[in-house]
């Protein structure tokens, strides 16, 4: 397994950095999208997004700017991607205390959600190699994993091209596994990935680095 110092190729260019580089009004529009997901448990519509942008004094190009920053992507009239949220079902379901359950884009996004929202919660997923159910619970600063041997694969497709967003290049390949053995078997059958097997503490820290400040950083 890798440790946190080996994660440069996965953390560089992450959503936290991209959000920090957005101009203030766009950063607040991005946060409005994230809050909407949290409160509604469902993706906001493109119409809602345009109205919120207009209310903030932004023109229609704001939606395109969020997409260019790989922060928010609209597909078929709804927000399909707003890391850590997925507007369509994924294997990673997150139920935060007092809020509707939501889908996360990937395993790291799922781990980042309790940290971003500042709430306890429960993550359910499944090992893509053999279907073993995986449950991660966050209670205060304590995390529990079932099975206790579970790990995360952080993977990046190497054949996606230069125009791919993280949702295409990384999210499908950043997944929970019931054990390191299962993760190694998965990687052996999936050529073309730049990947690392992350222990539980490292995966949680990666979630913290990517998502913990998205709603609370500078305006």
Image (cartoon, rainbow, N blue to C red):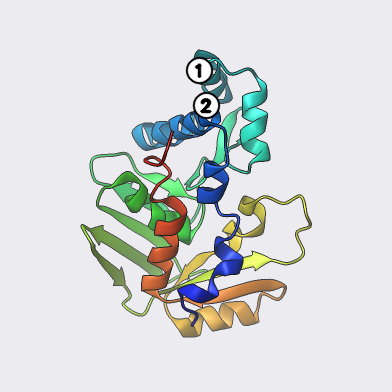
Residue at mark 1? 56
Task: Kindly state the secondary structure of the residue where label 1 is placed.
Answer: loop
Question: Which quarter of the rendering shows the C terminus?
Answer: top left
Towards the viewer: 119 or 124: 119
- Of labels 1 and 2, earlier in sequence is 2
Q: Which mark is residue 107?
A: none
Where does the image place residue 80, in percent across and percent down from the top left?
57, 39
Q: Does residue 33 appear to the left or right of 75 in the view shown?
A: left
Where does the image place residue 148, in percent across and percent down from the top left?
31, 77
Task: Kindly state the secondary structure of the residue where label 2 is placed.
Answer: helix
Residue 146 appears in which quarter of the rendering? Answer: bottom left
Q: Which mark is residue 25?
A: 2
Towards the viewer: 125 or 215: 215
The residue carrying pointer 2 sits among few (fewer than 14), some (14 to 19) or many (20 or more) residues within 10 Å by Cα, namely some
The residue carrying pointer 1 sits among few (fewer than 14), some (14 to 19) or many (20 or more) residues within 10 Å by Cα, namely few
Question: Which residue appears at 38% of the width and 73% of the height?
Answer: 200
The answer, for residue 213, to whether it is visible in the render is yes
Kindly indicate whether the residue at mark 2 contacts the one at mark 1 (C-beta within 8 angstroms).
yes
Where does the image place residue 173, in percent across and percent down from the top left?
59, 64
Q: Does residue 174 appear to the left or right of 169 in the view shown?
A: left
Q: Establish if 215 lies above or below 127.
A: above
Towards the viewer: 84 or 145: 84
Q: Establish if 60 lies above or below 12.
A: above
The answer, for residue 92, to whether it is visible in the render is no
Question: Which residue appears at 32% of the width and 45% of the height?
Answer: 117
- Give the CA distance from mark 1 to mark 2: 7 Å
Towards the viewer: 155 or 115: 115
Q: Does residue 167 appear to the left or right of 90 in the view shown?
A: right
Residue 102 appears in which quarter of the rendering? Answer: top left
Q: Establish if 113 lies above or below 155.
A: above
């Amino acid at each position: 397994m890798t440790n946190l110092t080996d994660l440069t190729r996965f953390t560089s260019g992450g959503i936290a950095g991209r959000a920090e580089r957005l101009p203030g009004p766009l950063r607040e529009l991005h946060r409005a999208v994230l809050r909407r997901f949290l409160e509604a448990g469902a993706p906001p519509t493109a119409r809602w997004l345009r109205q919120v942008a207009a209310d903030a004094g932004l023109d229609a190009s704001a939606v395109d700017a969020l997409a260019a920053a790989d922060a928010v992507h609209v597909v078929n009239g709804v927000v399909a991607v707003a890391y850590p949220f997925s507007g369509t079902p994924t294997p990673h379901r997150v139920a935060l205390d007092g809020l509707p359950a939501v889908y996360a884009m990937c395993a790291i996004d799922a781990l980042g959600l309790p940290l971003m929202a500042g709430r306890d919660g429960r993550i359910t997923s499944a090992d893509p190699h053999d279907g073993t159910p995986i449950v991660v619970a966050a209670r205060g600063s304590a995390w529990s994993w079932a099975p206790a041997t579970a790990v995360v694969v952080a993977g990046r497709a190497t054949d996606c091209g230069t125009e791919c967003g993280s949702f295409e290049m990384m999210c499908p390949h950043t997944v929970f596994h019931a054990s390191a053995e299962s993760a190694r078997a998965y990687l052996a059958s999936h050529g073309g990935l730049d990947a690392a097997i992350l222990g539980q503490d490292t995966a949680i820290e990666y979630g913290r680095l990517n998502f913990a400040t998205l709603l609370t950083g500078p305006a």
